[in-house]
Amino acid sequence: MKEARFWKPEGDRIRCQLCPHSCGIAPLRRGICGVRENRDGRLYSMNYGKVSSANVDPVEKKPLFHFHPGSEVFSIGSLGCNFRCLHCQNYTISMASLGEFGTRDMTPEEVCDIALENRCQGIAFTYNEPTIWHEFAYDACKLAKERGLYTVYVSNGFIQQEPLREISTHLDAMNIDIKGFTQEFYKGVCRASLQPVLDATTLAHSLGIHVEITYLIIPGKNDSEKEVREFAAWCSDLDPRVPVHFSRFHPDYKMTDAPPTPIRTMEMAKRVGEEEGLKFVYLGNVRIPHGEDTYCPKCGALLIQRDGFTVTSVEPRDGCCPHCGEGLYMVQAESKAVRPERPTG
Ligand code: SF4
């Protein structure tokens, strides 16, 4: 464990200021996320360096389609979450308490070493919510940048402004999950609130973090054309070039009453997104021809072909269309990774 940042004392309680829940934590108790504890009047991050999951993934799996396309990223997660989504696909770690699920201790140095030994170009904080791992993620992201790796968050976007500003100095990209576009959905399904997520997404974009947005379409919950249109219009106002990934729902965890998203609903979302001015709309978790390919919004050229998480061709250069020069809101910088020396012999 490590002393946490972003809190203040309130009598014998501690007010955590990391995420918008702003938990008031009594002595020897933890906040909603289950990983920040009041001990002797100070707040501690109990999951510092506790890694529950680690894999080398294509960056497309995050999903990030306009950020180092075709690269591999060392992806790690811990335990806990500040949401309680009824349809969580990673509930075995996000809903687990420390000690309930096996973890491995890692230092920021080890995370970077493993990434480089596996010839990854970056590290990603994913699988569970990275915001509630802030102190470890900050230390690892800072070191990763020093060693030439890119850094990624896959996040629900439920973070207060100051911690987001702090991590932004070492964070290159975020995929932010906007889970629905009504407060009712956020309250009933996630036990959270929509507006702070929109505020954090806007701030992340304004801070220069590369942002892509995912919207999981759940039949009967957040799939009306009206709601999808309001979501798409908001994204378009933020920046019409920000890639939007509509993802197909499959029943999971406590939400087994909703069926998989019909293909016609996925197609509706793509049409509505484009009608609202979005330039890059993708369909994920489903095989729809060209649903994950990238086209130039100006000249229409096919620029990146994808087959599942595999990139089969990448034409853009320096983030632009090679045919007409249109900017694609795409990060393609060459890796400057400094790899650890391998033992000889
Ligand atoms: S990070 Fe955890 S303890 Fe802090 S406010 Fe959010 S849920 Fe509460």
Image: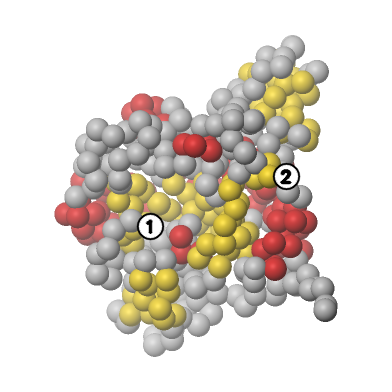
Q: Which residue is mark 2?
A: 105
* Residue 66 picture location, percent across and down: 47, 67
Q: CA distance from mark 1 to mark 2?
A: 35 Å
* Quadrant in which the N terminus appears: top right
Q: What count of labels does the image hold? A: 2
* Residue 168 picture location, percent across and down: 65, 52
Query: Label 2: few (<14), some or many (≥20) within 10 Å?
Result: few
Q: Secondary structure at mark 2?
A: strand
- Determine the residue positioned at 49% across, 71% down: 69
Q: Earlier in the sequence, mark 1 or mark 2?
A: 2
- Report whether 41 appears left or right of 67: right
Q: Hey, what amino acid is under mark 2?
A: Asp
Q: Is residue 248 visible?
A: yes
Query: Label 1: few (<14), some or many (≥20) within 10 Å?
Result: many
Q: Secondary structure at mark 1?
A: strand
Q: Hey, what amino acid is under mark 1?
A: Val
* Residue 143 picture location, percent across and down: 76, 58
- Report whether 55 appears left or right of 255: right
Q: Which residue is mark 1?
A: 244
